[in-house]
Image (cartoon, rainbow, N blue to C red):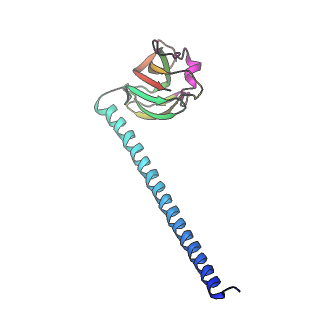
């Protein structure tokens, strides 16, 4: 015959284990949720600090363009955000567009250089519309750089970031900055 007292103890133990497991799961989820809220607010604070540093650099350095990095290291299939600042140093409104131009690709690195603006469009995501800055005004823009996963672009690339004035021709460059992108496989 079955011992009813032993069966009841096993049932109570199972209930206690389930309650403890659910409690620990709830505490763990609450901890992770709080951690993500902290990370999100920290990220927003850092983004605002970078934005302010670029604006300060434009004003104190008396620059037309503030481009904080000279080398960007990125893996294929990854992306990163580049923050740039543009300042109108003139006394007239500045109607401008941004452009990236490939100067050279890797020598003997087994990669292919992005040869034109169509290939670079896949690398850089930003508004291609013209923008207007009033006299002595500044603007900070975010640009997403992402290298396609299936691409054969591995190595170091020399590029130029250009701010073009209206009319938007290659001979009408308001400011430019050279930089490198290193793509790892």
Viewer-side residue, 144 vs 1: 1
Number of numbered markers: 0
Task: Please indicate whether residue 87 sits to the left or right of residue 167 in the image.
Answer: left
**Where does the N terminus fall, quadrant-wise?**
bottom right
In the rendered image of this protein, does residue 144 appear above or below residue 177? Answer: below
- Say above or below: 11 vs 129: below
The rendered magenta stretch, by its main secondary structure, is classed as loop
Front in this rendered view, residue 181 or 29: 29
Q: Is residue 110 magenta?
A: yes
> Where residue 151 sits: x, y (%)?
58, 23
* Residue displayed at 44% across by 24% down: 182
- In x, y percent, where is residue 82? 45, 33
- Residue extending farthest to the right is 1
Q: Is residue 37 magenta?
A: no
Q: Quadrant of residue 93?
A: top left
Q: Give residue 11's position: percent from left, percent from top.
A: 63, 80
Residue at image coords 48%, 54%: 36
Q: What is the magenta range?
A: 104-130
Identify the image quadrant of residue 123.
top right
Identify the residue at image location x=37%, y=43%: 49
Residue 161 at x, y percent in the picture: 45, 22
């Amino acid at each position: 015959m079955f011992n009813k007292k032993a069966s009841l103890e096993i049932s109570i133990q199972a209930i206690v284990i389930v309650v403890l497991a659910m409690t620990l799961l709830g505490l763990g989820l609450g901890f992770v949720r709080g951690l993500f809220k902290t990370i999100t607010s920290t990220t927003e604070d850092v983004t605002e600090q970078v934005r302010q540093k670029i604006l300060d650099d434009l004003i104190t350095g008396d620059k037309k363009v503030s481009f904080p990095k000279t080398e960007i290291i990125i893996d294929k299939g990854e992306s990163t955000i580049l923050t740039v600042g543009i300042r109108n140093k003139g006394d007239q409104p500045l109607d401008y567009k941004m452009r990236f131009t490939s100067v050279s690709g890797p020598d003997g690195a087994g990669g292919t250089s992005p040869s034109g603006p169509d290939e670079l469009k896949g690398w850089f995501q930003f508004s291609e519309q013209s923008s207007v800055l009033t006299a002595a005004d500044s603007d900070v823009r975010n640009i997403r750089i992402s290298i396609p996963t299936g691409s054969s672009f591995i190595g170091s690339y020399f590029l130029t970031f250009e701010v073009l004035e209206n009319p938007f021709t290659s001979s009408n460059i308001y400011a430019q900055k050279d930089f490198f992108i290193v793509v790892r496989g």
